Amino acid sequence: MSILRLKYVDSYRDRHGRLRRYLRRPGHRRIPLDGEPGSPAFLASYSAAWAAADKQPVVAPEIGASRSKPGSVNALVAAYYKSAAYVTLVTGDGPAGHGMTFTIGRGNELCVAAVRALAPKVEGLVLPEGLDDMGGLWKRLTSDSQLRWVGPDKGVIHLATAAVMNALWDLKARLAGLPVWRLLAAMDPAEIVALVDWTWLADALDPGEARERLEAKAPGRAARIAEMEAQGYPAYTTSAGWLGYSDDRMQALAAAALAEGWSHFKMKVGGDPADDLRRARLLRAAIGPDRQLMMDANQVWGVAGAIAAMRPLAEVSPWWIEEPTHPDDILGHAAIARAVAPVRVATGEHCANAVMFKQFLQAGAMGVCQLDACRLAGPNEAVAVMLLAEKFGVPVCPHAGGVGLCEIVQHLAFFDYVAVSAGLEGRVLEYVDHLHGHFLDPVRMRNGRYLPPESPGYSIAMHPESLAEHRFPDGAAWAAPPVAEAGEDLDEVGDWPV
């Protein structure tokens, strides 16, 4: 048995044999904490201790200033810092749990502060039995009435909940000696259903029906696991499709991707309409008529603008148009979906919670479900969305890229196929080839497919050297601010975060 403690909380026995707890961050004095973990006295003293210490991120790596067009330029986001609020759950005598939520620079410190606000919810958890009820843990983190006021189930507090829940699942899987996808796939249908808070979802999918649908797919799980281990999960690439690429570079990158076995390609749109069409024709010609071409507008259009922009682009037969308008506009997405069919509308990377996904699906506003493993509050909520999408017959094609998203979301895609959807039609997982070297268990690709993770955990843990180098603001990577190139406004290319 071990006791879970969050970083910088420790304990000792005084000369009378009594257990004392304290907060001590590097470079700061030890601050005593009162009461038992989880008690009102403990929570009050914990908050007071943080207030007494100078604010300092727990771990907030921000990996590089993305200032060039590859990987940073789309129609709405000019540039960003690939950042993450990174959580380490430390146990007394067992493995650590690692979690994160992905951000793009400024605002990362808000996620770190929100993680601190959630910390007392899990500090002192008894292991391993404290991780038996992951559905109950999810409710504990999301049901605090005061923290819900700054949500609920959305925004910074929900991103922070994702980081903590991801860390808890990583820890649970490490203790079980399994990768998260295998841990989930080993659960029986009733256990999977129990992960979900059905309070606001049961009108669309009754938990009893969800269990029955899972039971119907259960007999083929072993065969699907073997298939994934042999063949991998299909993926798509955006390597050739970034805005700002020259025609020659786009064509060369497309040719290289074809040689590597890729069959699905995504391009960014939302710039000049004539240039979008010209680039789309070039990419379609490069990949041929039999491969899938997808488009991503990154929310740049209004509803009418999206419909108008997609009329000429339909010439190149795109499979989907991603985030054609504001991610909260459910009825707007529905109107676009009706107007641009048979092109599908793909969205979800900025969809805040399972309730919104439910409404997108009920309204026929989502033809491809692109859940995000760091925007939804961990695997629990992702499972809820997968179950809903399966009920409505909408394929799940998770969003990836960024810091660690490919590493995390692959687990969800494998589980979805093995236990929920039992089919691959219309399903591909996004792949972006950057930053994988910072992770201890990076993704493995073969012929345009993800190979299933084999190491225990959620594939989130980063190399200690990467964490130290990129920790903001004291890591070596931040020794000097970025310098603007000639003619650039530093604030527009990703300035020194504050």
Image (cartoon, grey):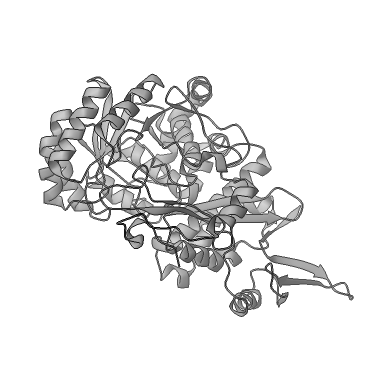
Q: How far across and down, in percent of the image, does residue 130 sit?
A: 65, 54
Please state the total of marks drawn on the protein image.
0
Residue lying at 57% horizontally and 47% vertically, measured from the top left: 169
Between 68 and 283, the one nearer to me in the picture: 68
Q: Is residue 143 visible in this depiction of the protein? A: no
Q: Is residue 419 left or right of residue 485?
A: right
In which image quadrant can residue 439 be found? top right
Occupied quadrant, residue 340: top left
- Decide: is 315 above or below 79: above
Farthest front residue in view: 486
Q: Is residue 58 above or below residue 253?
A: below
Q: Residue 401: where, in percent of width, then height?
A: 42, 42
Which residue is nearer to you in this view: 68 or 483? 483
| Residue at (36, 37) in percent of width and height | 396
Question: At x 27% / y 52%, what residue is drawn?
Answer: 76
Pick whichever, 190 or 81, lies toward us.
Answer: 81
Quadrant of image for the C terminus? bottom left
Residue 252 at least partly seen: yes
Measured as percent of width and height from the top left, residue 424 is found at 38, 26
Residue 261 percent across, percent down from the top left? 39, 21
Judged from this view, the residue extending furthest toward the right is 15
